[in-house]
Image: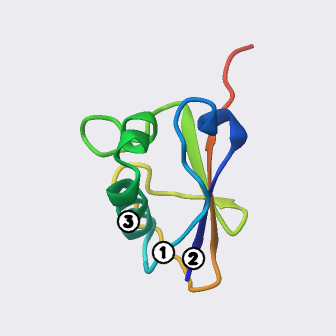
């Protein structure tokens, strides 16, 4: 079962402990997390269900390609890291 991990920077705003989920895509994994932690959805996704600009998700160390649909595949052994993206200059 994939493991979803939220960085401490996000956990400062909303409680989102590590979770093991049954999923084959990032969307399925996040939907399971959000069903248990509905407050986390607003910090991670925008009103259209896409990743917010300040959030990035990595699956097994690689940034996901589909920020809108979250269709990137995950394996049973995958680690999904959800973190705030840095911006500025």
Q: Is residue 64 above or below residue 23?
A: above
Q: Are marks 2 and 3 in contact (CB under 8 Å)?
A: no
Q: Secondary structure at mark 2?
A: loop
Percent x, y for residue 39?
38, 40
Q: CA distance from mark 1 to mark 2?
A: 6 Å
Decide: few, some or many residues near mark 2? Use Cα within 10 Å; few <14, some 14-19, many ≥20: many
Relative horizontal placement of residue 72, taking residue 83 as reference (left or right): left
Mark 2 and mark 3: Cα distance apart in space: 11 Å
Coloring basis for residues: rainbow
Dots 3, 1 in contact, CB < 8 A: yes
Looking at the rendered image, the quarter that the N terminus falls into is: bottom right
Percent x, y of residue 11: 61, 39
For residue 21, the mark is 1
Q: Indicate the position of residue 87 as horizontal and vertical percent values.
A: 66, 23
| Percent position of residue 12, x then y | 63, 31
The answer to whether 65 appears left or right of 63 in the picture is left
Q: Which residue is mark 3?
A: 32
- What is the crowding at mark 3: few (fewer than 14 residues within 10 Å), some, or many (at least 20)? some
Q: Nearer the viewer, residue 17 or 26?
A: 17
- SS at circle 1: loop
Along the line of sight, the residue nearer the viewer: 69 or 8: 8
Asked if marks 1 and 2 touch (Cβ < 8 Å), the reply is yes
Separation (CA) of disc 3 from disc 1: 7 Å
Question: Which label's residue is closer to the chain start, 2 or 3?
Answer: 2
Q: Residue at x 55, y 48 (%)?
A: 16
Q: Is residue 16 above or below residue 23?
A: above
Q: Quadrant of the C terminus?
A: top right
**39 sits to left or right of 74:** left
Residue located beneath label 2 in the image: 2
Dot 3 or dot 1, earlier in sequence: 1
């Amino acid at each position: 079962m994939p493991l979803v991990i939220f960085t401490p920077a996000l956990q400062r705003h909303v409680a989102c402990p590590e979770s093991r989920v049954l999923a084959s895509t990032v969307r399925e994994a996040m939907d399971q997390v959000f069903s248990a932690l509905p407050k986390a959805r607003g910090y991670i996704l925008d009103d259209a269900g896409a990743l917010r600009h300040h959030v990035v998700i990595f699956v097994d160390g690689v940034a996901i390609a589909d920020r809108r649909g979250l269709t990137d595949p995950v394996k049973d052994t995958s680690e999904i890291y959800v973190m705030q993206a840095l911006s500025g200059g």
